[in-house]
Image: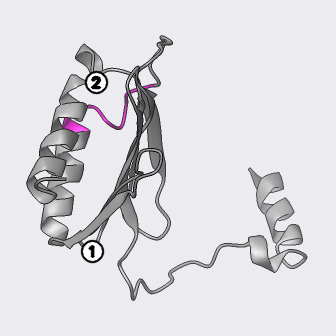
Amino acid sequence: MKIALITCALIAPLFPALVRQQGCPNVIAHEPVVVFEVAGSTLATQVDRTLTVYADGSMLMSEAGQAGSRGQCMRVQTTPGVVADLKLALIKAGAQVLCDHQIQVTDVPLRTLTLMGGTQDARAHTFSYWTPEPEYAAVDAELEAFIAEQFPGF
């Protein structure tokens, strides 16, 4: 342990950009908490849809258009409490411990969820799944219900 501390102390002056500042004031609490993407193709169409939720309650839902058509995007504002509730519901559904789906499928869009801490220096957990089979069903249900509530008609 002492060797690592000495090494960091010797290297830090040489590469100041690599040394993370401690205690930055978080003046703008606009850090991402959830990024959920559904992307890929089915037999009938291409799918590309992304939900991004920020700690301050800002949310963005976007969807690419089909060939020759325009996509759509909707930005809404909610409260940080709603964001915290979503994060807690996803954690209770297993979003911090689920791993990538261990099967390969065709003609089904891939769903990828990244759950972050919502702070400046937060760790994240990301996993991908093809279908909301039992281990992914609760997470998927929370996300789809949230999208339907916050982005009606999207």
- Res. 136 mark: 2
In percent of width and height, residue 35 lies at 39, 52
Q: Examine the rendering and report whether any part of residue 85 can be seen.
A: yes
Prevailing SS of the magenta stretch: loop
122 w.r.t. 135: above or below: below
Task: Read off the residue under disc 1.
Answer: 56
Q: Residue shown at 51%/12% (left/top)?
A: 104
70 w.r.t. 146: above or below: below
Q: Amino acid at mark 1?
A: Asp
Count the marks: 2
Q: Secondary structure at mark 2?
A: helix
Distance between the alpha carbons at the discs numbered 2 and 1: 27 Å
Which of 10/86 is in front?
A: 86
- Please give left or right for residue 101 compared with residue 58 in the image: right
Q: Which of the marked residues, 2 or 1, is nearer the chain's N terminus?
A: 1
Tell whether position 45 is magenta.
no
Q: Residue shown at 90%/76% (left/top)?
A: 14
The stretch in magenta equals 91-99
Label 2 Cα crowd, 10 Å radius (few <14 / some 14-19 / many 20+): many
